[in-house]
Amino acid sequence: MEISERNLGMIVNKLSPEEERTPKWKGSGSLSKNLIITPTEPNVVLGPGQIQPKGYRLTCGRYGELRLAFFKMKGTIEVEVISARNIVSADCETPPDTYVKCYLRDGDRLRHKKKTRVVRHAAEPLYKQTLKYQTADVFGRNLVIMVWQRCVGFEHNQGLGGAEISLDKLNWSKPAGGWYVLFPMHSFGSDSNDSP
């Protein structure tokens, strides 16, 4: 499933509690002509079943995306990790070595970890790898997918972003998927960008 090209330059900022969306009035004329309402979200489309982390919204800047597809086959759910784009800035001298980790969220815990292979030196990595889960383990849980940069030596691997998908919201009668916006790693409840 292909989603039309999106406006480049979206990043994620944490909202402060006092930053509520309220109508702003202009002048003292009639309501219909002078009410200016700021939109709650810019023109960004989340992937099918994607959950936006609480307290985060997309604002102008740059954001990464991960292309995924989902299939249901005889007692298994297949998650195809296809590719990623915009995960590093365009002026990056050496593209990173990246891989994707996939978990099932069980309350506050991440379980059933699966990983893709490392794609070396690619600004827009092509993974083309299928991760399989048993149907009994999946339903009623969310899928958390994170893109990681592999670091050399004794450095910890760094999280580049992630997405959370409600598997119950997907239509399993046909293959589903698309581009999923990557939110910052700390929006998934982790205090660190280090690889779990």
Image (spheres, rainbow, N blue to C red):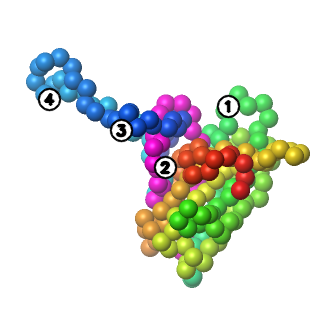
Depth order, front residue of 114/24: 24
Q: Indicate which disc, 2 or 3, sits on the residue closer to the N terminus.
A: 3
Q: Is residue 161 left or right of residue 174?
A: right
Question: Percent position (x, y) of residue 178?
Answer: 52, 55
User: Quick check: 115 left or right of 179?
Assistant: right
Residue farthest toward the bottom in the current orientation of the protein: 74
The residue indicated by pointer 1 is: 90
Q: Which numbered dot is residue 32?
A: 4
Whichever of labels 3 and 1 marks the residue nearer the N terminus, that label is 3
- Residue at the left extreme of this rendering: 30
Task: Categorize mark 2 by other alpha carbons within 10 Å: few (<14), some (14-19), many (20+).
Answer: some
Q: Which badge, 1 or 2, comes first in the chain's sequence?
A: 2
Horizontal arrangement in the rendering, residue 25 relative to residue 75 (left or right): left
SS for callout 2: loop
Local packing at callout 1 (Cα closer than 10 Å; few below 14, some 14-19, many 20+) is few
- Report the magenta residues as a range: 49-72
Alpha carbon of mark 2 to alpha carbon of mark 4: how far?
Answer: 33 Å
- What is the three-letter code of the residue carrying label 3? Thr
In the image, what residue type sits under mark 2? Pro
Q: Nearer the viewer, mark 4 or mark 1?
A: 4
Residue 106's spot in the image, x, y percent? 55, 68
At 55% across and 73% down in the image, what residue appears?
A: 138
Q: Residue 40: which disc?
A: 3
Q: Residue furthest right?
A: 153
Please determine whether, in this image, residue 7 is positioned above or below residue 131.
above
- Disc number lying in front (4 or 3): 3
Q: Earlier in the sequence, mark 4 or mark 1?
A: 4
Residue 12 falls inside the magenta stretch: no
Residue density around tag 4, few if under 14, some if 14–19, many if 20 or more, within 10 Å: few
